[in-house]
Amino acid sequence: MKIVVGVDWSDEAFAAVEQIGLLYRPNEVVLVHGVDLGMFHYPIVAEAANLQGYDEFRHAMVEAGRQAVERCRTLLPAEIPSIRTLCEVQHPASFILDSAAFVKADLVAMGTHDHSRVTEVFTGSVSHNVLLHATQPTLIVKGKARPVTRVLMAVEGSQDAVHLQTWLTSHPFKNPVAITILSVVPSLYMADPHVMVGLQDWSEQSKRYAEQVVTDTARALASPHFTVSTEVRLGDPVATVCEAANTQDLIVVSSHGRKGLDRFLMGSVSHGIVHRAGCSVLVVR
């Protein structure tokens, strides 16, 4: 398993690196730091602004970045066969995404500063942009690194469940975990009671379908690596998953991102879970 981790000098980045060592036994970890010079990314801009000591400034920023990735290297288990570091003057999110594509990463990991969602939409953040544009599964680490023993796997349907089950069995965790397979049937809030009567059968059928999906998935996942339980709830998918995750160490969910402008303004269920959850989230694509 090959993992790319976006890092900087923040505690959140250090936590992401440590979390990788607790969660997986990777064959290779690539630590990536893009040195962000802001408006002085290009020397011509610095010259136009008459910035004194530009070369020294650039060198100091690059050296700080190199020290950050070397600090992160020390946080990884010594038994990982290959640990590489990349540090260049690049826009951080783009550099992480490009590096993940170049090395054919199985997973991209990032810590998050947990900006508000409004702030993310209008100003962006590195973790937000990586989550939004990555084509690889993405692990967003929240809070301090911790052993993962309880995992919530949120599924929407049979294809979604098979996709997640395939990922989990192909990329096993470092240690066995107790996994809860949850499917949320959206609640119907309608003002007209006559309309609600017509939709009652639909709701019951949806619940039975969800119960069958989690049961089939539990059967497929059953192994020494997983102690499996199942649950079906009614409610808003994002709020319900986050509530169920209050006693969990990690949420695993698929991405069903929206397209075009709607994707940027409204996000998706997976992005909503990443934003609101109190624990780390693995978004499988």
Image (tube, grey):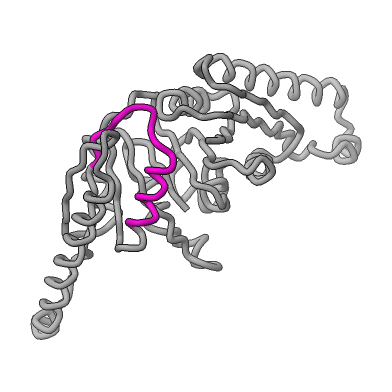
**Residue 201 magenta-highlighted:** no
**Residue at position x 11%, y 77% from top?**
200
**Residue at position x 67%, y 26% from top?**
85
Above-or-below relation of 66 to 171: above
The quadrant in which residue 269 appears is bottom left
Above-or-below relation of 246 to 216: above
Q: Residue 281 placed where, x, y %?
A: 39, 41
Between 264 and 106, the one nearer to me in the picture: 106
Q: Residue 174 placed where, x, y %?
A: 39, 28
- Magenta extent: 161-179
In the picture, measured across the screen, residue 250 lies left or right of residue 209, that is: right
**Residue at position x 86%, y 26% from top?**
54
Q: Residue 112 placed where, x, y %?
A: 48, 35
**Residue 162 magenta-highlighted:** yes
In the picture, measured across the screen, residue 252 lies left or right of residue 37, that is: left
The quadrant in which residue 248 appears is top left
Between 205 and 141, the one nearer to me in the picture: 205
Q: Residue 209 placed where, x, y %?
A: 19, 67
**Residue at position x 66%, y 40% from top?**
103
